[in-house]
Amino acid sequence: MGKPSVERDSSVYCPTAWHVTHWGDDAFCRGAYSTLLPGGSQGHRRALGECLGGRLVIAGEACNPQAPAMTHGAWDDGIRAAELAIRHNARRVIVIGAGCAGIAAARHLHGHGVDCLVVEARNRIGGRTHSLQLGSVTLDVGAAWLQQFADNTLARESERLGIRVLKTDFGQPLSAASDGPLHGIDAAWQALRHGIDRRMPLADGVARYLAGLPPGQARITRYAIEANLISEACLALEQLSVESLDEQGVGNDDRFLPGGYSQLIEHLAAGLNVRLGQPVSLIDWRDGELRINDERGDFCICTVPLGVLKTLDFVPELPQRQRDAMAHLGMGNLEKVVLQFDQRWWPRSPTGYLRWYDTPVNWLEWLDLTDALGKPTIAGLIAGDAVQRQFAGRTDEEIAFAARDALRAWASAVEAGG
């Protein structure tokens, strides 16, 4: 979090506070969430989560083909893993990680009377959900929405607890492009999904598809790819599986938590045996007693993010099927900057959702949180290769002001009818 260290300007455009995330550099996640690498499929997600030797299960959003990259996907997969432990008559379970998957697993086991210990590397629970104070408001710098609300287990928990949520319509952004008016993004995206040759690597298929389009339609389609694929899968086309075209992202009845995710996570973790500041580097799951750090048990549920999972040592090593699954899954690059001002100076979107199409792509998506939080606050999202372009060699203050400049460019384009 920060405030201007120097007097940049005293205008309405100068943020009073900001926060810049660095999930990609975070040793305890190494990225935002899982995505499919070339050749990757939902089958690899399922394979990664198989029960091994009746005493080890890898769990989390990366293992959930129905809701990958989502908090409720992690939660549901944690419950799946807990059920496997119960089915194998586990007496003492060690859960690694106190994010959504780990808390779900421990809560389910606790409810069934199974002795369970959660070891968490951070000095807080929540994993990639993290609420903090910026000025006078609480906001999320990690996951911030309950997605697929009608089928979301965490949404049912929020309702049970009476937590306030607000609907966000991601299907109706206030959009502008740096090179002129923009129309037909959604139609172009659907045409690409149905028209691309899926027998080819994704980048090759996209190149061939674009080559067959008139210049104007190719422009719209490139922007559609940035908005609906790169900003969701969070890697460059060359690093993605063609099946990434079919994994769902935002836009399915999503609800925002004005009070932050932590209010939900802390309720759900109440009463669990969680030990913080306990990083794990080795999982010894040989025959007999399972060993994690100084702890002993007969079953382990490992819920660390995929980026961390790839750094762990397993004794014995994971079977080839799971190693192959990991090789086809990667971590997407997604970062967020939250800017706070004395007043809202940007055009107001009826849905609170903004998109900025620029070349090269930078801060593509914006969420205007002003009405929800009662303070002029806006969050920008940046994904894929754009993270490196915008972050490399810059301080957080420089990143925040560069994001502010992108927001000003978007506002000028909207006012000019772009």
Image (spheres, helix red, strand yellow):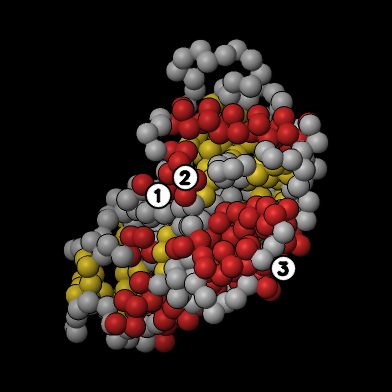
Report the front residue among 119 and 33.
33
Mark sitting on residue 191: 3
Q: Do the residues bearing badges 2 and 1 touch, measured as CB atoms within 8 Å?
A: yes
Report the front residue among 96 and 174.
174
Q: Quadrant of residue 231?
A: bottom right
Tell me the residue that label 1 is attached to.
Answer: 24
Tell me the residue that label 2 is attached to.
Answer: 387
Q: How far, Cα to Cα, is label 2 from label 1?
A: 9 Å
Q: Amino acid at mark 1?
A: Gly
Q: How far, Cα to Cα, is label 2 from label 3?
A: 28 Å
Say which residue appears at 49% left-offset and 52% top-offset: 384
Q: Position of residue 290 (x, y in %)?
A: 22, 76
Q: Amino acid at mark 2?
A: Val
Q: Earlier in the sequence, mark 2 or mark 1?
A: 1
Crowd class of label 2 (few under 14; some 14 to 19; many from 20; radius 10 Å): many
Q: From where the camera sits, is residue 104 visible?
A: no
